Each structure stands twice: as structure tokens, then as C-alpha cells.
Amino acid sequence: MAEKFTFTYEEKKKMAAQTAEILTEEIGLKGDAIEAVNLIPDIEAGNLTIEEVEKSHGESVARILHGLARIQQLYAKNPAVESENFRNLLLSFAEDMRVILIMIANRVNLMRHIRDTDNEEARLEVSQEAAYLYAPLAHKLGLYKLKSELEDLSLKYMEHDAYYHIREKLSATKAARDAYIDRFIKPIEEKVKAAGIHCHIKGRTKSIHSIWQKMKKQKCPFEGVYDLFAIRIIIDCPQEQEKMQCWQAYSIVTDMYQPNPKRLRDWLSVPKSNGYESLHITVLGPEQKWVEVQIRTERMDEIAERGVAAHWRYKGVKGETGLDEWLTGIRNMLESSDGMEAMDQFKMDLYEDEVFVFTPRGDLHKFPMGATVLDFAYHIHSKIGNQCTGGRINGRVVPIRQELKSGDQVEILTSANQKPRQEWLNIVKTSRAKSKIRLALKETQVKDGLFAKEMLERKFKNRKIEQDEGTMFHVIKKMGFKEVSDFYKQIAEGILDTNAVIEKYLELREGEKTITGDNVARSASEFELDESKIAGLNQAINDDVLVIDRNLKGLDYQLAKCCSPIYGDSVFGFVTISGGIKIHRTDCPNAPELRRRFGYRIVRAKWSGKGSSQYSITLRIIGTDDIGIVNNLTSIISKDEKLVLRSINIDSHDGLFSGTLVVMINDNTRLEALIKKLRTVRGVKQVERI
């Protein structure tokens, strides 16, 4: 806006008066809107605040100034002004539609003043905004005269040579063009008036911008543009006879001159979305030249020329949806007996069901009202959504369920350990996000179920117990699970201990009572170390010692499969229903749920010792499917004597590969070093621990 240039206070006051004149003469605004415009220089100079304006000039004037201030905040985000979403966002930001009309008038006035400025960069930026933002806004509001002026002035500053080339050509051909228009109009005028139709006919040379667009579209010079002007037949008749007399005039014209049927535009039967009504036809006139003829009534011409400021005696055309109804409402208010004063109570609600938000780069996205940060994450990418832990809105960290508001700048926060949850379906608003969450949950459930089933089968084999499917199904029911999937899910998450399942299985199979006691969960602090049993413990670690709760050592424990902790990881203990302890990483994806539901069964744990044992770690790798990439990955591992590659599984699809490496490793320091090395391999996009 005007702040891109330096103006004195006196110049700003003068320009405000000129903007007010445009609003009054070209658009038809008066009252509070004009008062607000004249106060803008004082607001910008700090002589007045909006709160003071509200006290001295009333709520309506203050509301307009507040709307203009919000638009200034929007500009600070510097989004792509050529996007349709940005135009819609401006409309939704304007608390009062007069704000939009003032913006258009202000830009027209500014464009008239920047001809002699030395700031070429600012002039170009202002002109680009006029072309991509303000001209389309003026078009939406039916302000065709201002739209054409904005387009021509922006072309003048953006395409200087093209503008003056076309203007000179128009000047050189003006006399011949005027003579041809007279020859074309005279016989039509005679026949139309002879048919009893009261009208006047005029020729209108098309705007320089319109001609330039045709030259670019048709890839031809100025001489190749055949419709440099249009003939307008404007009929004066009662509203109930409008269609009949327009089609009658159309019939007369097409009887006299050969029409081009492909160029018929009937906006009489079905008006344009902004209320524009007219009949357009292109005919072959004298000297075999194509001429565009527009047929409309006085009412239609008034609305076409002045848009929302059409004369009060004309009834606005009712549009079909959204913007059309909104514009019709504006027209009805402008045409009411109270005139412009009725605008004081008017609030825009066109986009009340939508919000427009920015990415950190300034890209704009549209969401339904009530959409959350999680919706935004899934809109960007499925993986971003699946790993979303929250967001940062306008620099402030917020949870995934935070609702979005128009104008928000949203950044998504992720974690590789995050996984979608069932309750997420109640957080998101968009169907796109819901479907992606359901898909991710299904994939996770299948994966976890298979993993848990395999793990349980291994435990049975280790204890040399033959597993019977019928008995196993009976165990699942006895343990209170209605769905088999829920049973395996709890095993995979470490909530249900496999030893307890096996004991229950033996109990049912052999008809004996459980050998696990009362199954009451106890704190690790209740355990007493039996020195005689230390030598017989089948410890998973040798020199690695895990200190549990109050400095207890030598307790029997298991490393949770869901997060596979290793020496050096920050960990905690979870007392299972059989009394055994499962060790989880503190950033385990199941940790929040365990703490929330079973906080009384959480015990502290930490590593001590040398960290000389070997742990099985699985790494997921994704990258470009280049020749030799598998060899490059495995060679890194083989060069390290303390690393053992247990298995590698790679799938390739559409030029990308994804797979897993299972490695035996000592501690998390060595693991982090390995991950860094693998990430340096050419073609590797992502390496993460799972």
C-alpha cells in the first residue's frame, strides 16, 4: 500500500481526500467510510488511536480502521498475492466490506501518483499487486471502470514499451477507427429504432491491457487483433421487457451481419457470478472485419459500470451462491431507503465456514472452520501427519488439537517416535486427514500384531511348550479380550507380559492353578535381592548393569521390544502383571500411555557398568535406488569390528528403496555414530531407529 513510498503528512492528507473522492464519485460510498479514510493519516502519524476514534467518531468508523489495520498485518506475512486464496483471505479478513472498497480506491489513487517516483522497485511491486490482487477484487465487485484503470496503469509501469506501443498504435488508427464505427452503427441504429426499441449506440475502444492480453494469447502483433473495439447497444425499457427487447436487437444485428456462433456469450439468461448481464456477439461487419457487439439495458449498463454503487432504483440481480449472494446483499443495502447509512451494520460473513493459513514460507492453504494443527500436518504430507507432535502458530508452541484461525502462520513439529492414535480421529476435521489416520492405524495394528505374535511364539519355543491355537484362543478370552488384535496390541506395547500369557496358557491346558501368585503388581522397591540366585540369572547383559528404583541391582528384567533400549539410553522400568520388569526408553512411543494409565507401576532405572554387551537394533533406511547402494551400506558396518550385521531387508519401488538393517551394537553412542555414517551414503534420504 502507500507505505511502500515516503509521503509527508500533508501529502498523505491530500491523498486521503483524493481517495475519498474516488469512493464517493466512482463507488458511491459516503458517511463513515469517507470519515475513516480522512483519519488514516492521523492514525499512521500516531496523532490518534483507534480507541480514541471510537470514542470521538463512533464504533462504525473505528471498525473500518481496525479492518484496515488487520490487512496491514496480513501484508507483513508477505504471501503470494497472485493466489486466489489470498484474495479470498483478504475478503475474510475485512470485518466490513467497506474496507475492501477503500483498499481498491486507495490503490487506484496511489497508482495515479507514482508515475514520477524514483523508487523503481517499489513502483513495480505496487503495480504487480494492482494487477494480481486489486484488479481481480474490483472485478469481483463489478467495479469495471476501476478494474480497467488498475490494469492499464499496472501495464504502464510493468510493461512500459508494450503499453506505449499499443497507445501510439491506437492514436494513429483513431480517425479510421471512429469512421468505421460510424459506418457500422448508422444502419443498425435506423433498424433498431424502426422496430420501436428506444436505445443509444456507442463504440468503445478496448483497454490497452485487454489488447495486450489478446496479443499475447493470440501471439500476434497489434495489427492482428481484429476486435480493437466493441459496439454497445444500450436499451431504455421497463425491467419486465428487458430480455425480450435485448433478443429483438440481437436478431436485428445478426440479420444484418453474419454472426460467429462460437463467439456468442449469453449472460442475459444466466448472469455472471458478480451480477453482470449482457449479450455479446461477434459479427462480420463492412470490409470483412470482425466486430464485437454488446447488447444490454440501461440498468445492466449502470450495474456493469459502477458495480456495487449502481443506481438505487435498479434492483440487484440475485446470484447463485457464496460471493453472488454476498454481493446481492451489498447491493440491496446500497439501494435501501437509508442509502449508505445501512452499511454501518453490515458485516462480511462470506467465508465464515473457511479459514486460510500460511506455511512458514508464506504459502497459503484453505481449511474448513474448526480444522486443527493435525489437519494441517496431514494436508502437507502423510508422514508429517503420522509423526506430528504439535505445532508452532505465529511462533507459539501449541498442541495438535489447536484450532486454526485465518491468518495463522503454522509450522509443524514432529518426532520419529510419534505414531498415530485412535483418538486422533476425533481431533481432525477434514476427511483427508481421517482417511490417512485410519490407514496408518491399520498398518500399525497389522505390523504390531504380527510382531507380537512372532514374539509370543518364540517365547513358547524357548520354554519348549507346544502351542495349541484352540487353547490360545481360550486364553485370550479368559484374559478379557474381545478382539484378538487388542490382545496382540498390548503384548507389542509391553503392557501385557508374555510370561503371564504363558502361565495362563499352562493353567488352562493342564487344569492347574496359576504359578504366578496373585498377579498383583508390586513396586520394584518391594523386591529383595537373593544373593544365591545372582549366579543363576540368565542375564541379557554381561558387564552392563541396570540400576532399578532405589539403587537395586541384579533384578530380573527384560528389554521392551517396542523401543529396544540399549546401554546408554535414558530408560525407565515398568512392573508387569507377573511382577517382572520391562525396561523402556524414556522416548518410547508407548511411554506417555504407560505413565498415564499405569503411573503407579513405573520405576526409575539407569545404566552403569562398561557397556560391553551386544544389543539387537533395527534401523529403517529410505533412499534413491542407486546401483551398489546396498554394498555401500553393508561395507560401513563390516569395517567396524564391534558391529555385527544380523539381517538386511530391502524393497525397491518406483526408483526408491526402503528397508531395515538389524545390527548388533554395544551402546547408543556407537549407534549414533553408525547412523551418521549411513546418512552420508549417496542416495540415502533417511535413517532412523525403530
Image (spheres, rainbow, N blue to C red):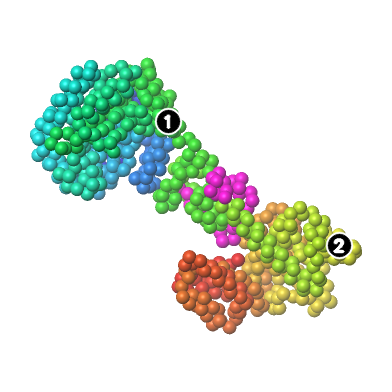
Residue 327 placement (x, y as % from top left): 38, 29
- Labelled pair 2, 1 in contact (Cβ < 8 Å): no
As drawn, is 364 to the left or to the right of 268? right
Question: In the picture shown, does residue 107 fall above or below 666?
Answer: above
Mark 1, residue position? 320
Residue 277 placement (x, y as % from top left): 32, 28
Question: In the picture shown, does residue 329 fall above or below 5?
Answer: above
Q: Name the amino acid type tagged 2.
A: Leu
Residue 603, located in which quarter of the rendered image?
A: bottom right
Circle 2 residues within 10 Å: few <14, some 14–19, many ≥20: some
Residue name at image x 16 percent, y 37 percent: 289
**Along the viewing direction, whichever of 603 and 467 lies nearer the viewer:** 467
Read off the magenta span.
Answer: 409-435
As drawn, is 158 to the left or to the right of 472? left
Between disc 2 and disc 1, the foreground one is: 1
Mark 2, residue position? 508
